[in-house]
Amino acid sequence: MRILVECRIIDLSPTGARLKPQSDRPLPLDLHLHDEDLDFSTPATLVWIRKGEIGIRFTPEPEAGE
């Protein structure tokens, strides 16, 4: 897995997260959040960007064969 930008998790919910990227590098709309400390990894969609923070919504893993 390729890491685009390191982020600090500010808020985490069952449906998404608010993150503080450590750089202002552009991000794709579809991304993957991975946190080694929480042993957590999931696909997500970028929903909003404001004041140096981003909001993402977790998306379901594709079913096998899709």
Image (cartoon, grey):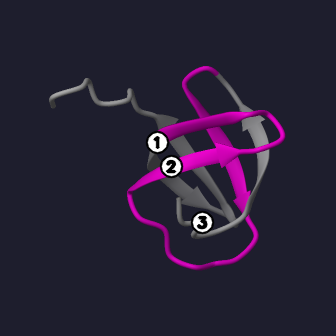
The secondary element bearing badge 3 is classed as loop
Image quarter of the C terminus: top left
Please give the range of residues in magenta. Answer: 14-43
Mark 2 touching mark 1, by CB under 8 A?
A: yes
Cα separation between marks 2 and 1: 6 Å
Residue at 26 percent of width and 24 percent of height: 63
Provide the residue designation for mark 2: 32
The tag on residue 44 is 1
The secondary element bearing badge 2 is classed as strand
The secondary element bearing badge 1 is classed as strand
Residue at 61 percent of width and 61 percent of height: 50
- Furthest residue toward top: 14
In percent of width and height, residue 8 lies at 79, 54
Say which amino acid is labelled 1. Ala
Mark 3 touching mark 1, by CB under 8 A?
A: no
Depth check, front residue: 41 or 50:
41
Cα separation between marks 3 and 2: 9 Å
In percent of width and height, residue 53 lies at 68, 58
Mark 3 touching mark 2, by CB under 8 A?
A: no
- Mark positioned earlier in the residue sequence (3 or 1): 3
Q: Given this view, does label 2 or label 1 mark the residue nearer the observer?
A: 2
Disc 2 crowd rating (10 Å Cα; few below 14, some 14-19, many 20+) is some
